[in-house]
Structure formats: structure tokens, C-alpha cells
Image (tube, grey):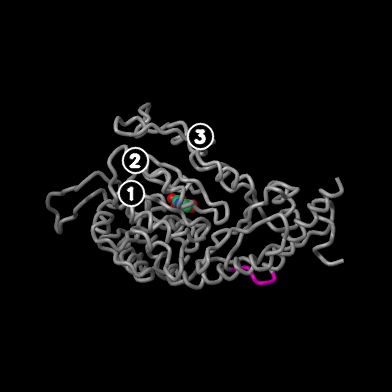
Amino acid sequence: MNRVEQPLALDGGPPVRTTPMTSGKRWGFEELREVLDVFESGKLFRFGGEKVPAFEQAFAETFGVRHAVASTSGTAAIHIAIGMVNPDPGDEIIVAPITDGGSVVPILYQGALPVFADSDPETFNVDPAEIERRITSRTRAILVVHLLGNPCDMEAVMEIGGRFNLPIIEDCSQAHGAEYRGRLCGTIGDIGCFSLQASKHITTGEGGMTITNRDDYGERGALFMDKGWTRQPGWGPRTYAFLAPNYRMPEIVGAVGCAQIRKLASIVDRRNHNGDLLNSLITDVPGVHPQTVLAGCKHTYWSWALTVNPEAPFDADTFASALSAEGIGAGAHYIGEPIFLCMDAVCKKITLGESQFPFSYPGAAPVEYNEDTCPRTRDLLQRWVSLGISEFQTEPDIEDMAIALRKVSLGLHKRAQRS
Ligand SMILES: Cc1ncc(COP(=O)(O)O)c(C=O)c1O
């Protein structure tokens, strides 16, 4: 009996996989050498130090942009982007509903309201038509997320941005090195934001980067990262140009980034190869549907995901449990609910003290976030199953994942026929 036809591990059959996936570390001596330089230089601070400026320069060169501002997290990178756009209180920023809280927190901190546009159930990304439906006279920017490393429909997004004269912010926190029709994600819109947290394609443990080709945004972002401090030479009086936090990246962190950015291309290529290979091996598996990649785009697979078809005789929880029993780790529903239902700061408006600011700002339009706000996104998350993918996995690893996916689908179909 071939491996696909054996009884499901869930029912006591032999699991597809009994050994862990091939794994590895994305950091080592290259990073250590850069960090040693910092200790030898005696400079731990980015102003006067060399590593953070060098990391910013290398990041800008890699992405072919004029400005890169390093910061302390992906959330900080997005906050810097919102700070570049500089909304007025009560302005609205349209944002994707499947994302990390870090895409939404900076909008609220800048006094703007997040407005969520529903998802495309094929790509799992925000649907451009839904973005357009939510544009009002208060809309100030559009923030798209290239979810899991899958490029959004940027042609449509840019067309809408151009027509309504709205800046586009790309959240590339899961999409380092992803490409939309030959162009790197993060360089198509007005601003690109990256998380460098430990799980990301390249990492500094914690960290962020905001990139732009616009000089006005670049200059404002560099100030926003540093409390708005204009930093005149010498020890004279100070000026802080506007309200802003301190998101300065330390030199030790920048040193790690200098080594990591050199590894980006090879990490991304291997992840893309592995994810695309898995897609190609399961095209005819019934009852499930992998995340659709738009033609001409390069998905960089921070994670790999599928949806269980609505008519399948099993649900996402059963499918994920059956895969895990086969020795292929899987999880159902990703973030569980659209991000606004996960965050009390949004759905219950618990923000600054009792104020409910910015929702309570007199100039803000009344807005509610509930189960009907993005119905397609809720349905998509209900049917969602994620699998881990990495640059270290070998082709036999990926083949095992494909065998397990096929075995579980066929096994669960057979189970349903029997009952
Ligand atoms: C899409 C997205 N946006 C923003 C963030 C926030 O990044 P950080 O955790 O580095 O603040 C993350 C982090 O996971 C993310 O995945």
C-alpha cells in the first residue's frame, strides 16, 4: 500500500513523518563578527556609530530606494510610515483585516481611525474593490499587507491610490523580497515597512525598517524615529520639530542587520522554491485550495496556507489535527478573527484612559467594528490552515508535506463516505 492510501495517523495508521523537518539557524559567525566591531568601536549609539547607518544604506541599496529608516520593531516601522503621512485626528486609514496588531496600533496612536476592507478569499489579501468601497472624504492613506509573503494586487491598489490621491503604505512584515511583476514589494507604493522580529525572513531579533523614495517622507521619517529631534551639531540648544517617539535602533542590533541583509536573496529564493514546489505537488488534492499567487508574482512564504473548501466533508480544525498527527505541524484559523475583533482597542474602543480617542474625536465619523464588518474575512479564517515552511527544508521534506496533505484529504473524504 502506498503512503497516501494508508490509514490516517489520526485513526492509528503510520504517520507520514516521524522525524522533524530539516531546520537550521539564520544567524551565526557573520552576525557575531559585525557585533564584535561594535564592541571594538566603543559606540553603542546609532548617532556616531557606523552599523545602523550602514544597515540603512544596505537596505536602501537592496531595495533600490532613496531612504531607509531603521527602528525597533515592525510596529515602529509602521508608526514611522503613519508619521510620514501625518494624518489629522479623525482621519481614516484603510487597512487589511488579516494582519498583526502592529499594523493597527500605530494608526490609533497617531489619532487616526482604522477602516477595514474585506479580503479576497483566493489570495487572502485585501480586495482592492473593497478598499475603494470604503474611501470617504476622511480617508488619508491605504495600508496593504502582503500576507504571508504573497504580493497584493498592487496594480489595482496603485490605480485606486492614484485616482483618489491617497498614499499607499505596504506592510511587508511578512514579505521581505516578495515581488509583484518584477518589482520588490515595499517599493511600489509610497512607503514600505518591514518587521525584523525573530520569525521573519531576515531578523535582528527585534527591529524594523521603513523605506521610501519620497524625500519629504524620508526626511520626516528620520525625525519621527528620533523624537522629532533636529540634532544640530555640537552641544547647543535643542529643537524638537513635532511630536514623535524614540524608535532608534541600537548599534548592536544594526550590526546583526548588516550581516542579515546579505543573506536576504538566498533565503527568499529557497523559501520561494519550497512554497511553489508544495503548491505544484498538491494542485489536484480535493477539498482544499492553497493561497493563490497572482500571475508574475513571487511569494516568499513566511508561512504556507490553504483554505478548506466550503463543500469539503471536513473542517479546518479536523484537517489541521490530522496533518499534525501525520507529523506535519499545522494550525487552523491563523489569527482566529479579523484583527479588529482580536483587539479591544478597536472593537471595544479601549484606548487612552476613558476617552475612547480617536473614535470620540468630534471630527471623526461614527464607526463600529463587529462580526459583519468583513464577512468574507471571517469565513476565510474559519477555513484557514497554516503549515510551516522554511529555507532549510529539503525537497524530500516538501514531498512529505505534499504526501501528508493528499493522504489527509483522501482519508477524511473516505471517513465521510463511511459515516
Ligand atoms: C503583517 C505584520 N505587520 C506588522 C507586524 C508587527 O511587527 P513587530 O512584531 O516587529 O512589531 C507583524 C509582526 O508579526 C506582521 O506580521
Quarter of the rendering occupied by the C terminus? top right
Which SS class for mark 2?
A: loop
Pick whichever, 66 or 91, lies toward us. 91
Disc 2 Cβ-to-ligand 1 distance below 8 Å: no
- Spatial CA distance of label 1 from label 2 is 9 Å
Which SS class for mark 3?
A: loop
Nearest to N terminus: mark 2 or mark 3 = 2
Report which residue position mark 2 lands on: 112
Residue that sits furthest to the left in the current view: 236
Estimate how packed mark 2 is, as few (under 14), some (14 to 19) or many (20 or more) residues with alpha carbons within 10 Å. many
Pick whichever, 12 or 372, lies toward us. 372
Residue at x 63%, y 68% (from the top left corner)? 393
Nearest to N terminus: mark 1 or mark 3 = 1
- Spatial CA distance of label 1 from label 3 is 25 Å
Residue at x 14%, y 57% (from the top left corner)? 234
What x and y, as percent, mark residue 38?
35, 65
Residue at x 79%, y 59% (from the top left corner)? 15
What x and y, as percent, mark residue 53?
30, 65
Report which residue position mark 3 lands on: 370
What x and y, as percent, mark residue 95?
43, 47
Report which residue position mark 1 lands on: 82
Q: Which residues are magenta?
A: 392-396
